[in-house]
């Protein structure tokens, strides 16, 4: 099967060059032209896809060759891009920066090659003129399989500065597709784990996306960018779109009967719990669950009939006082977990299930305390399930990502969730009755049986 979707990868020499501004602004600008735009983000980032969703009106999706494996990048891309006129993929870090010690794996360049997509390089030109040509030439020629189809110059100071940059880049042989001036209004506030999520900014986030779009429209050649996107051929490998029901599970007659008694799976949302991959909800639904979102900051009860609970990542440390003040919901979560119902918690969810967070009472499901620290824990992890749980059978191998500035004491229970492989092997997380709680963010598309197993436990618990 050969599927072609016009597409661009927005990359940069390093973080902080303006990828998010350009990618999000370009998505919004294409959408304003009447194009159906499919938004994607390389890597495990949960925050940028929220801005992408505002820009396009479609759910933002991640493409992570480490978490899901290179073989799923094409199918997941096609799944998200179905029915779209064009796709924009925002890169991560510098173009060639991948998983530590793994070469190009999970880098923007790796994903661009897997998709056979042209790359647009966003360069922070604020402190250079002629040197920009050497930089662009180096990035464009480093890997012959990466096709850098154009450059967008960001933070250009003046018309004279732009003239010098363009003259230099004529020698590099890479066309200039846009020039953006410095513009404070398109900046988005950050804190300890990156940009502030859309769910916390609401109207301000809408204004920021509109400002990004205006800057891109004013400074970029949208026609040339769209034409470049259309030079991308079929996604290689004969990829077919990924579907939540394949390849591990195909519906049977008994599955159809199970749909008549779909268990309610509650997923924590709202400003405190914004980290979630869209595919998780799709997998749970395909496995027969009735997925309902609730907000632990405001809802004092779990959704009616809740049979299982999923609490993903986010910023409970920012909302610790509000979460603690919602005592009725904390008690409801504790009662559900105490009943043996399946509960899956990642990172922020782990903190919420603890006895306390920075001295404030949490759900008390786990006999552990959590606190903010100065230390950033960040990186990909190769993990294996230590024992059986509601998510995985013992020995199941999954890859995850850790990203937090908190610590939980103790770091694991009598039955840990994962054994983390590598130079410094360790165990982490908690498996207690129906609870699986861990710092690791995982992408269930890499192991679709996780969602199936969870929903089956919801039916039988």
Image: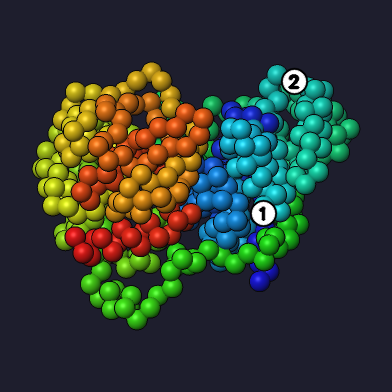
Q: Residue at x 70, y 38 (%)?
A: 121
- Label at residue 128: 2
Q: Give residue 128's quadrant in the image.
A: top right
- Disc 1 versus disc 2: nearer the observer: 1
Instruction: Give the image location of residue 51, x and y in percent.
Output: 47, 43
* Residue 234, image quadrant: bottom right
Q: Which mark is residue 55?
A: none
Of the numbered discs 1 and 2, the one sitting upstream in the chain is: 1
Residue at mark 1: 115
The quadrant of the rendering that contains the N terminus is bottom right
Whole-Å distance between the Cαs marked 1 and 2? 32 Å
Q: Is residue 431 above or below residue 406?
A: below
Residue in the image at 85% along x and 29% along y: 167
* Viewer-proximal residue among 377 and 297: 377
Mark 2 secondary-structure assignment: loop
Quarter holding the C terminus is bottom left
Q: Are marks 1 and 2 in contact (CB under 8 Å)?
A: no
Q: Residue at x 85, y 28 (%)?
A: 168
Residue 181 in picture, x, y percent from top left? 65, 29
Q: Residue at x 13, y 52 (%)?
A: 339
């Amino acid at each position: 099967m050969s599927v072609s979707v016009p597409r661009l990868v927005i990359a940069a020499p390093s973080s902080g060059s303006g990828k998010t501004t350009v990618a999000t602004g370009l998505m919004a600008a294409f959408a304003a032209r009447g194009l159906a735009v499919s938004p994607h983000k390389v890597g495990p980032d949960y925050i940028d896809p929220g801005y992408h969703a505002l820009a396009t009106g479609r759910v933002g999706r991640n493409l992570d060759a480490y978490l899901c494996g290179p073989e799923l990048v094409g199918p997941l891309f096609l799944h998200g891009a179905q029915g779209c006129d064009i796709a924009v993929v925002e890169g991560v870090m510098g173009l060639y920066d991948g998983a530590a010690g793994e070469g190009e794996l999970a880098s923007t360049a790796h994903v661009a090659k897997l998709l056979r997509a042209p790359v647009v390089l966003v360069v922070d030109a604020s402190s250079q003129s002629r040197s920009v040509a050497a930089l662009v030439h180096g990035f464009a020629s480093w890997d012959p399989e990466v096709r850098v189809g154009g450059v967008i110059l960001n933070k250009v100071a003046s018309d004279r500065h732009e003239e010098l940059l363009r003259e230099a880049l004529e020698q590099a042989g890479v066309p200039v597709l846009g020039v953006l001036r410095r513009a404070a209004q398109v900046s988005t506030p950050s804190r300890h784990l990156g940009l502030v999520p859309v769910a916390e900014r609401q109207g301000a986030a809408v204004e920021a996306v509109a400002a990004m779009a205006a800057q891109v429209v004013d400074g970029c050649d949208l026609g040339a960018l769209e034409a470049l996107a259309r030079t991308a051929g079929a996604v290689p490998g004969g990829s077919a779109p990924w579907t939540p029901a394949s390849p591990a599970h195909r519906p049977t007659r008994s599955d159809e009967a199970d749909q008549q008694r779909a268990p309610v799976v509650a997923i924590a949302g709202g400003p405190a719990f914004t980290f979630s991959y869209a595919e998780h909800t799709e997998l749970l639904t395909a496995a027969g669950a009735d997925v309902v979102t609730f907000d632990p900051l405001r809802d004092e009860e779990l959704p009616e009939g809740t049979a299982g609970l999923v609490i993903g990542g986010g910023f409970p440390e920012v909302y610790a006082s509000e979460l603690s003040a919602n005592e009725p919901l904390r008690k409801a979560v504790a009662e559900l977990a105490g009943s043996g119902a399946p509960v899956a918690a990642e990172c922020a969810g782990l903190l919420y299930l603890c006895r306390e967070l920075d001295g404030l009472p949490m759900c008390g499901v786990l006999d552990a305390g959590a606190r903010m620290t100065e230390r950033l824990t960040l990186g990909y992890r190769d993990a294996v399930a230590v024992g059986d749980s509601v998510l995985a059978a013992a020995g199941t191998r999954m890859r995850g990502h850790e990203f937090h500035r908190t610590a939980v004491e103790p770091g694991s229970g009598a039955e840990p969730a994962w054994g983390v492989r590598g130079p410094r092997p360790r165990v982490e997380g908690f498996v207690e009755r129906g609870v699986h709680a861990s710092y690791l963010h995982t992408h269930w598309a890499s192991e679709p049986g996780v969602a199936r197993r969870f929903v089956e436990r919801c039916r039988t618990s």
